[in-house]
Image (tube, grey):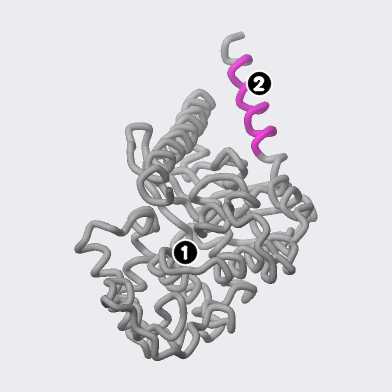
Amino acid sequence: MKKLIIICIYLCVILKLSYSQGIEKMQWDNDFQIHLTLANDSNYILDIKELHHTSVNNQSNSFTYLPTRLNNDFVQKLKQTEVDTSSLNNTVNIESNKTLWSALHKSLGGGWVHFVNCLLYSMETGYLDITAPLMKRPDSNWKPSPVTESYKRTKKWEYYVPVDQKLAIKEYKLKKSNDNLGHLNDVPTEFVNLFLNANQSDYDLMTLNPLKRNKAKVDLIKILIGANYLGETQIKYIKSMVLKAMVDYADDQLPSVIIFDNFNAAVAMSLNETGYQVDKIVFADERFISIETRLDRVCQIKLIVNQINEVNKEIFRQKLKNYYN
C-alpha cells in the first residue's frame, strides 16, 4: 500500500512538472543525448555536452545563475506591457530611470536573473545595440575643472559604455582593483572569461551568426561596466529595446535543460517572477533505480531550486542597498 501511494505521488509530481511547459516526453538515452517531444508533436535532440552542467546543492549560500528560458506565463504578462517609445522624448517617471536596474525592474519585475536574461535576449535578437545612435557620446572638447576621475576613465569612450575591448577590459580591472564590480560579481564566470580573453579582433568576429550569442554575453559585461556612466536618455533607450524584445519573445523557444551532475539528472527549467521553476526531470540511470529513489531525487532537486531562489533573492536585496541606491 505504501509503495502504491509513493507511485501515485511520483506520477502526480511528474505530470504536474511536464504540463507547464508543454513537454510531452523527455528521455535521456544511452547516446548521451536528451530527446524532447513537445505538445505540438515536434521532436528535438539535445547534446549533453552542449548543455549547462551544475553540481549545486542545498548547502549553497552564494548567488547561482542558470541559463533558462522565460516561463510562458511570465512572457504573456510582458506581452501585455505597453511599450511606449515616446518616453525617450519626455521626462516622465524620472525616478524609475535613475539606474538601469530600477528602469527595467519597474517593467519586468523579478530579480537579477530576469534582468540578465532579458538584457541578453534583447541583444541576441538585435533589438538592443550598444552602438546605437542614442548610446553614442557627443563630440566635445569640454573638460571639467578640476578634472574628475570619471572624466579620466571615460574620455576615450566613443559610446556611453566601453565598446572598445581594450578600454572595456581596462575599466573592468579598475573596478575590480577598487572592489567596485558590484553585480558584475554575479554574472556567470563563463561570460567574464569570454570577455577578458577576447581582443578587439575576436570581438569583431562575434558579429558573425554562430558567435552572436557570445557577443551578447560580452556586450552584457560592457553594459554593466558602463552602467554608472549611463544618462537618463541611454537608460530609457535600453529599457525600451528590452521591452520590445520581450513583447516579441519567441513562444516556440525550446525548453532550457540543465544537467544536475550530482543527481544524474536532466532538469527542464524556466524562469518566472518568483525565480527558477522545475518543469520536468529525467535521470541517466532511470531504468536502474527504484521509484522511491526517483521521488527522493525529485524532491531534493526541487528543494535545491527553492533554496537557490531564496538565496538569490536575499543576496540581491542586500546588494541593492549598497550598489543601486
Residue type marked 2: Cys
- Which residue occupies 69% across, 33% down? 15
Residue wearing tag 1: 50
Q: Which residue is mark 2?
A: 8
Marker count (numbered): 2
Q: Specify the label residue 322 is tagged with.
A: none
- Residue at left offset 33%, top offset 77%: 151
In front: 266, or 305? Answer: 305
Magenta stretch prevailing secondary structure: helix
Q: Amino acid at mark 1?
A: Glu
- Residue in the foreground of this view, choosing between 306 and 163: 163
Rendering coords of residue 33 (x, y %): 53, 58
Q: Please indicate, yes or no, whether residue 138 appears anywhere in the rendered image.
A: yes
Foreground of the two, 250 or 52: 250
Q: Is residue 190 left or right of residue 13?
A: left
User: Which segment did they paint magenta?
Assistant: 5-17
The answer to which quarter of the image holds residue 240 is: bottom right
Cα distance between the residues tagged 1 and 2: 34 Å
Report helix, strand or loop for mark 2: helix
